[in-house]
Amino acid sequence: MKLEIIKNTKAAPNMGPTFGQDVEPTGTYVREKTNFVPDGWIEGSAIINNPLYIDITDDTQIEYKRDLAKQYKAKGGKLTNTLMSKGYDAIITKYPDGKFGEIVLFSKSNFMMIENNTKTLIKKMLKEGLSEGKYKGSHKAPNRNSGSIHKFNKYFKGVEIKDFEDLKYPKDDSAETRKEILKIKSIDINMAFVKKCDDMKKMFKDYFMENDLDFPEILVSDILNGSAYLLLGVKNFYRRPRPNKLAKELGIEFEFVDLSTTKTPSFPSGHATQSHLLANILSDMFPKHKKSFEKMADDISMSRMMAKVHYPSDIETGNKMGDVLYKQYKKNNKS
């Protein structure tokens, strides 16, 4: 099995027992690559032949290390050697939706990391007005992946994170937030619908295939990657907790769908933003299908509330952000 992966170049702080570092197996800790590469991470690939799969949730993603140490009566390098002696070349943790969490590569794994030219990318960001000085406090800037920066500037240059610094949503401890949580809690979950809408690119692509249309694969990928660059910065600016986190603090029993696409802050909804952005762009290209594209975008937004991973205010703001990005896209790409 070949995986596209990313690895943090910054050394993890020594948290000892807090994160199971006192017993964790030695190896190279990586993640499966997604749409964006966070600041300080590098890309690479790995070939894994016989991984040890471990099922986890958000609440048990650390406990697996202690469970392994207890099961094999070993820790650190000895635990790794024991696992390799049983033929394993990696550990892959999996969430309930099938998406991968933390991955530990052993020396038997065949993997390679590719260093990014970080200094060059930082200079490019400063030149193009995307410096970290535009972010408040300790909020992280968007990733510095050169491809994402290029796609952002090609389609959305002129829009900056500071343009979204005054967005409003209910305070975490407000009665309105409680109402939002109770509202999405009341929505019945259709798991097939949620999973279909989670992969929006595939959803749009499937529609094109079903209607015998030529899918603009490169354009759609560029739009998703470019807009993700901005969205990550805005999300990290506000850092709103996901509904399940606040529900727990408020003492509300809450069932939600644990999706791998919900590992960023909640506000605004990236799925709502990007689906409405795509619907607008594709409607210009295929006007006869405008209503279908709009319905798909609405379905994707709805699915995020159905899964209980977004508040209604996340969705509402995301829809508006999609319209803002669409207007900038039109301005930057006049034919």
Image (cartoon, rainbow, N blue to C red):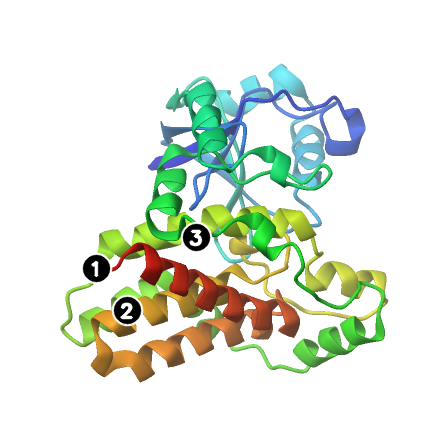
Direction from residue 149 to residue 69 in the image, left or right:
right
Relative image position of residue 290 (x, y in whole percent): 29, 80
Q: Is residue 173 above or below residue 86?
A: below
Nearer to us: label 1 or label 2: 2
Q: Is residue 172 above or below residue 332?
A: below
Amino acid carrying label 1: it is Pro
Q: Is residue 210 above or below residue 47?
A: below
Amino acid carrying label 3: it is Ser
How many marks the image carries: the answer is: 3
Tell me the crowding category of disc 1: few under 14, some 14 to 19, or many 20 or more residues within 10 angstroms, Cα based.
few
Which residue lies at the image location 63% right of the left edge and 59% below the top edge?
Answer: 267
Q: Earlier in the sequence, mark 3 or mark 1?
A: 1
Q: Is residue 10 above or below residue 152?
A: above
Residue at the spot of label 2: 282
- Which sits in the foreground, 169 or 48? 169
Q: Which SS class for mark 1?
A: loop
Q: Which SS class for mark 2?
A: helix
